[in-house]
Image (cartoon, grey):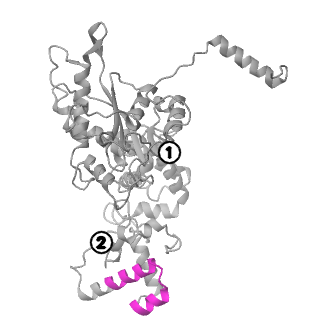
Amino acid sequence: MKRITRRNTPLHDLDLSAWPEVSIDHLDTVAKEKFIALKSAVTRYVQGDRVQDIEADQGVDRESLLRALNRCMTPGPHRGHLGWAGLLPGKRVKGTRRIKPLVPKGRTGRSGLTGALGWFFMRHQTIKLAFDEYLLSTAKAKEGYENKVRHISAHGRFIGLCKDHGVDPTQWPLNMDKRGKGAIYKYVNEFLDQHFDAIVATQYGRKAKTASAAGTGTYSRLRAERYLDVVELDEHLCHFPGGWIAFDTPGGVRWVKSPRLTLIALVDRFTGLVVGFTVIFRSQANTDDVLDVLFDASEGASHLPEADQAAEPWLPRDLGIPFTSCGFNQLLVDNALSHLASQVLKRVSERLGCDINFGPVRRPERRPHVEGLFSHLERFGFHRLRETTGSGPQDPLRVEAPPKSEPQMTEAEGISLIRRAIRAYNRHKSKGAYGVRRIEQLQGLMQDSERAWVFPVLPPSLRPAPRLGHQYLSLESAGERGERQATARLFQRGKLLQP
């Protein structure tokens, strides 16, 4: 392998502040002095000091310096590097490798074969490459392979490769009773661990893929540096059973059989605040619902009652100007059909001037703040009600006997329930807001005269374009549209003169 130096190593790998620290209290005096000298030498080398100066000051020559750096950069057990632990004396950074030929020992001839598979692969690289390709293709469920790696099938493929490449039947593994089954099983497990990120979805399922991307310590390159730099939009199907919803109509109250309620929310990544939301009485959102949320976040009216001037604010626009008409830079959505509609793309870009950043569905780690909102509402709000269906098959709330009569509530009650839950979320004291409420953190930014925060206030529209919360329909009939298009084609062909 190529030796690691400061020239061929990415800068993020040379961030010494991210290297895990180790304790050297258990070392003797000589070992401590050597560790401190090597650590100081590696630090100076990474920071750009000349090797000659390091050798003169620390007494560490170039060969020892590079060996120490390569030990620190050895991959660790938690998707990172060993860091300063690589400088500890006696720390093994390389795996064991058998060098001596295989000589069976013992009464049954099964002893003395430690490391036999590694020794075999060193002398049969073609078999190793073919076997690794088989494991990777099977784990990824490629066409022509099984949909999942099975140890017994992998062992059979390995023996088949040995026979196809002319391995001597009197040599390992063909001369053994189990033909190296235990070594192959162990090798398969290690192979799957090393290629976990590439095969987790097909080998272990979609839920494992989602869980594997969370808590890795890797932050998104799309960082929010100011309020409304990045906002996340998503839909959440509330865990309420379908019941009867009362709607106020001009003809009186009408009870309608309704599916579960769906919450559509827009969350700011910098503060974690819910800046806009809407509730629909359907399981799927459409284009108009998405535009309603964006209008509610950018130009919607305050949710505080006009008669109660002393009410505590809980949405950004409740603070008044400049939050009554704000845009944002990046809008993060998934690839749902309602987000891909041309009406959303055109009207949002024209009015708000933001970039729409599309991403895959069922990837909560890509939009962590809006997913965190939904999790918070379920755990501390909706799951505390008797009407909830629970969060999954293992939730005790799910297996309770249903009530004798179907649940009933009015439209206002359902919306009020979700409003109160979001109000409690925005006014919850958060560690991310440094121990204050999220809405109070935004108030502090607005009143910060030293930094002079500039918020993204929308300019007045230069042309009479409809607002995001309004729909517009063309009054042109199909016949008029066809006649206009035919006339335009004649003008293009030069058969009609323009007056």
For mark 1, give the secondary structure. Answer: helix
Work out how far the residue at label 1 is from the one at label 2, CA to CA, in angstroms: 39 Å
Label 2: state its secondary structure. loop
Point out residue 427 in the picture as x, y percentages from the top left corner.
22, 43
Between 188 and 407, which is closer to the camera in this rendering?
A: 407
Residue, far bottom:
56
Where residue 408 appears, as percent x and y from the top left, is 20, 16
Q: Quadrant of residue 57?
A: bottom left
The amino acid beneath tag 2 is Glu
Residues drawn in magenta: 35-58
Q: Viewer-proximal residue, 334 or 488?
A: 488
Q: Is residue 87 magenta?
A: no
Label whose residue precedes the other's in the sequence (1 or 2)? 2
Q: Residue at x 29, y 50 (%)?
A: 443
Q: Which mark is residue 21?
A: 2
The residue at which mark 1 appears reads as 137
Q: Main secondary structure of the magenta part?
A: helix
